[in-house]
Amino acid sequence: ATLTFPEAGKIAGKAPCNRYFGALPGTYPAFKPEKVGATRMACPDLQAETVFFQALAAMTTANVAGNTLTLTGPDGRNMVFTLASQSPD
């Protein structure tokens, strides 16, 4: 899965199956995505996609260290994203 910040106050990316987008109000290090929407393609990983979106919605804090973004929820669970080279779509 990927997570990008296409412009201030926005998130976008690719979940296990679908592309998604949403709003990200507030300022760093706060992380609380809102109005997340996604395309609706079917694939074998829909269960993993549901888990991904539930976890993303539960995150509240972001921390950037080097090429790593760590999102943390109030229960201490983390989602970790590493910077990858950008590929054309």
Image (cartoon, rainbow, N blue to C red):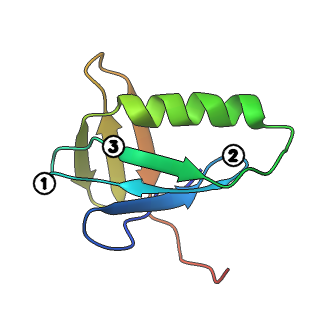
Measuring 34% from the left and 45% from the top, which residue is drawn there? 33
Residue type pointed to by label 2: Pro
Which mark identifies residue 71? none
Q: Position of residue 89 (x, y in %)?
A: 67, 80
**Closest to the observer: 62 or 54?**
54
Q: Secondary structure at mark 2?
A: loop
Q: Secondary structure at mark 3?
A: strand
Q: Work out whether mark 3 precedes mark 1 in sequence or the reverse, and give the earlier one.
A: 1
Disc 3: which residue? 70
Quarter residue 23 falls in: bottom left
Q: Is residue 49 above or below residue 35?
A: above
Q: Is residue 50 above or below residue 84?
A: above
Q: Position of residue 47 (x, y in %)?
A: 73, 28
Of all residues, the one furthest to the top in this rendering is: 75
Question: Between marks 3 and 1, how big is the CA–CA gap?
Answer: 15 Å
Categorize mark 2 by other alpha carbons within 10 Å: few (<14), some (14-19), many (20+).
Answer: some
Measuring 28% from the left and 60% from the top, which residue is drawn there? 66
Residue type pointed to by label 3: Thr
Categorize mark 3 by other alpha carbons within 10 Å: few (<14), some (14-19), many (20+).
Answer: some
**Closest to the observer: 73 or 38?**
38
Which mark identifies residue 16? 2
Q: Work out whether mark 2 precedes mark 1 in sequence or the reverse, and give the earlier one.
A: 2
Measuring 54% from the left and 77% from the top, which residue is drawn there? 86
Q: Work out whether mark 2 precedes mark 3 in sequence or the reverse, and give the earlier one.
A: 2
Residue type pointed to by label 1: Thr
Disc 1: which residue? 27
